[in-house]
Amino acid sequence: MKLLRVGTAGAERPALLDAGGTLRDLSGLVADIDGTLLADDAALGRIRAAEEAGELPALPAADAAALPAPGVAGLRIGPPLARIGKIVCVGLNYHDHARETGAEPPAEPIVFLKAPDTVVGPDDTVLVPRGSVKTDWEVELAVVIGRTARYLESAEQALAHVAGYAVAHDVSEREFQIERGGTWDKGKNCETFNPLGPWLVTADEIADPQRLSLRLWVNGELKQDGTTAEQIFPVGEVVRYVSQFMTLYPGDVINTGTPAGVALGRPEPKPYLRAGDVVELEVEGLGRQRQEFKDA
């Protein structure tokens, strides 16, 4: 299933995008798309049954007219997940990205956190922070947790705790992240720095998360063209590893790293983002994002 949330910021309603590209209203079945829903197999089963039976109503024309998505037009798409508990991120998790930045592949996953309030919709404006000269792009596969996970013993067990997947844009400010001392958090938690969506694709629709292509364009020029096959630590191992250090709850998100092609890995002068730039990105089977960058 492709689950999404549509409407103005803070007032999104739950929806489903069916195989024909029609937007279906879920508000009669569920209050929202969040960790509570993802942990409720019965509720998810009711959504599946209603979709298969053709019982889900299409969104009213006035609403559907606002949706910029394949097969539907018009209303804003918000983040596909409400009330995110935490966003765990993995750095330097692609062999090609490590090579382009001159870094040794890590022996263990590099883990940092991103605040849930960095999350915006997939096509919302992204703000270049005040004083920034090194705002960078990073297309990533996001993993959404569906079952409480602690001290998982295997990658296979970890994958059974995944509710679904989404496109994430882990926007980063490299000077804040690398050159200003302390941890990476300063360069990762600026306002609007985690566009998410357009939809959450349930795990049953992704046969192998290690065979997904990821692409990103800046002003129409292809910058990143990679595959999750290049991940140093695959999705199942990332979830297992993180569960050794913190409890993962339904509705938590893990950003699993970015492939080669970021501005940081380019020759000088590095083409960092500026106000007016447009970034588009996609992950195979998970949809596409588009953001215009503006000054904060």
Image (tube, rainbow, N blue to C red):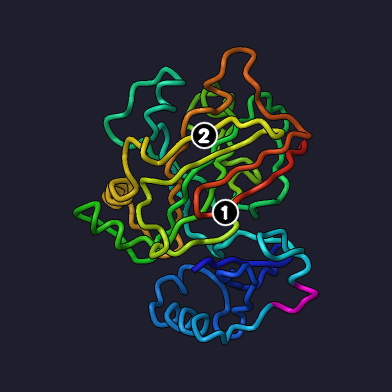
Prevalent SS, magenta region: helix
Q: Farthest residue toward the top?
A: 268
Point out which mark residue 225 bears. Answer: 2
Q: Farthest residue toward the left?
A: 153
Would you say 75 lies left or right of 101 here? right
Boundaries of the magenta span:
59-63
Residue lying at 33% horizontally and 37% vertically, measured from the top left: 109
Please tell me which of labels 1 and 2 falls first in the chain. Answer: 2
Using a 10 Å C-alpha cutoff, classify the residue at mark 1 as few (fewer than 14 neighbours), some (14 to 19) or many (20 or more).
some
Q: Is residue 84 above or below residue 41?
A: above
Residue type at mark 2 is Asp
* Secondary structure found at label 1: strand
- Find residue 5 and report its image quarter: bottom right
Whether residue 21 is in magenta: the answer is no
Residue type at mark 1 is Gly
The residue nearer to you, when weighing 198 against 90, is 198
Q: Which residue is mark 1?
A: 287
From the top left corner, tell me how far across and down residue 26 is, in percent.
59, 79
